[in-house]
């Protein structure tokens, strides 16, 4: 696993997570896409369980903690994805 945010973003965009992010950027419903993917991906099913019923603040804290565990800065990731913070 790499700690290079650019390489991580490139890998992300080629993954199911990238598809979910693309749906979000297009204004689609990423949760709906995740529900469709959950049947064939245990990781997506687990992600749905984690986010279900969480507030935006709780989701932000989860993302921050996950990034920190991997030695990443959420601000860098968001900037790399073209999202302001």
Image (spheres, rainbow, N blue to C red):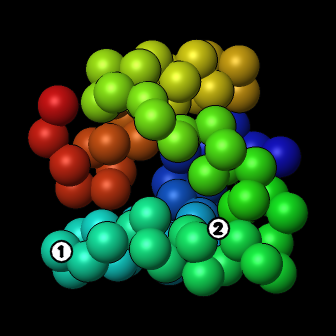
The location of residue 78, given as percent across then percent down, is: 32, 42
* Residue 3 picture quarter: top right
Residue indicated by mark 2? 11
Spatial CA span between label 2 and label 1: 22 Å
Marks 2 and 1, the one that precedes in the sequence: 2
Q: How crowded is mark 2: few (under 14 residues within 10 Å), some or many (20 or more)?
A: few
Q: In screen coordinates, is 10 left or right of 73?
A: right
Would you place residue 37 above or below residue 44 in this image? below
Residue at (31, 20) in percent of width and height? 57
* Residue 44 picture quarter: bottom right
Residue indicated by mark 1? 27
Res. 71 in view: no
Which label lies toward us, 2 or 1?
A: 1
The location of residue 84, given as percent across then percent down, is: 14, 40
At numbered mark 2, what does the secondary structure look like: helix, strand or loop? Answer: helix
Would you place residue 8 above or below residue 71 in this image? below
Q: Quadrant of the C terminus?
A: top left
* Residue 29 picture quarter: bottom left
Residue at (53, 24) in percent of width and height? 62
At numbered mark 1, what does the secondary structure look like: helix, strand or loop? Answer: loop
The location of residue 73, given as percent across then percent down, is: 47, 24
Q: Nearer the viewer, residue 53 or 80?
A: 53
Residue at (71, 71) in percent of width and height? 38
Mark number, residue 40 = none
Res. 55 in view: yes
């Amino acid at each position: 696993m790499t700690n290079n945010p650019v390489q991580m973003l490139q890998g992300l965009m080629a993954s199911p997570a990238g598809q979910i992010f693309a749906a979000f950027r297009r204004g689609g419903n990423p949760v709906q896409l995740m529900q469709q993917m959950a049947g064939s991906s245990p990781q997506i099913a687990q992600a749905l369980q984690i986010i279900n019923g969480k507030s935006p603040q709780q989701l932000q804290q989860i993302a921050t903690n996950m990034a920190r565990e991997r030695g990443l800065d959420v601000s860098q990731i968001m900037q790399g994805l073209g999202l302001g913070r």
